[in-house]
Image (tube, rainbow, N blue to C red):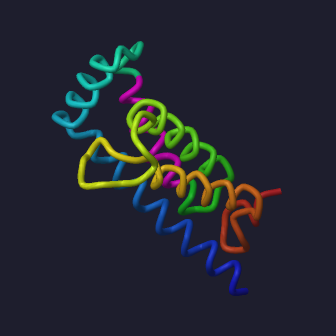
Amino acid sequence: YLLDLTLLAVRLLIGLLFIGHGLQKYNTQTAEYMEKWFIHKNLPFPGLLVKIARSWEVVGGVFLVIGFAPGPWLIIAVMIGAIYIAHKRWSPWLTQDKNSGWEYCAVLIAICTLLIVTGMGKYAIDAILP
C-alpha cells in the first residue's frame, strides 16, 4: 500500500514538472532561443530537436502522471540528450551558472529507471491494462 502511494506521488511530482517544463518550450521565444542554441552547438535539425524535446517532455510527463510505461523511457531519453548536449562538459554539480552540472539529470534518470524496474504501481493505467 505504502509503496503504491509512494510510486504515485513520485510519478505525479516528476510528471507534472515535466509537463510544465515541456509546455514552456511551446513559447515562441523559448523555442527560438533553443533552436539558436542547438545551431550554436552544431546539432543537426535544430528545429526538429526542439519539437522532439518539448513533445517528449509533455507526453512523457502525462504518461508518468497516468502511470503508462513509456513515460519513464521518454524522460530518460530527454535527460540523456540534455546531459550530452548541455551538461557533459561540466562537473556533475549544479551551481548558479545555468550551464552547470548534470546531477539533476542523473537523478531523474535513476528515478525513472526505478519506475521501469518496479513498475508504476497499483494506481496506474498499466495496472489495469492487459
In the rendered image, the vertical position of residue 123 relative to residue 60, given as above or below = below
Main SS of the magenta segment?
Answer: helix
Residue pictured at 45% horizontal, 35% vertical: 88
- Is residue 100 shown left or right of residue 11? left
- In the rendered image, residue 69, in percent from the top left (x then y), is placed at 68, 52
Give the residue drawn at x 60%, y 73%: 8
Tell me which residue sits at (47%, 68%) in the image: 13
Which residue extends farthest left? 29
6 or 107, which is in the foreground?
Answer: 107
Q: Is residue 126 left or right of residue 99?
A: right
Q: Residue furthest right?
A: 130
User: In the figure, is residue 29 to the left or right of 47?
Assistant: left
Q: Is residue 55 magenta?
A: yes
* x, y percent for residue 59: 49, 46
Q: Is residue 33 above or below residue 99?
A: above
Residue 77 is one of the magenta-drawn residues: no
> Residue 130 or 12: which is nearer the viewer?
12
Please give the range of residues in magenta: 49-62
Q: Is residue 90 above or below residue 123?
A: above
Viewport quadrant of the N terminus: bottom right
**Nearer to me, 63 or 103:** 103
Q: Measuring from the top left, give residue 65's x and y in whole percent.
A: 53, 62
Quadrant of residue 112 within the rendered picture:
bottom right
Residue at the far bottom: name it.
Answer: 1
The residue sitting at 33% across, 20% down in the picture is 41
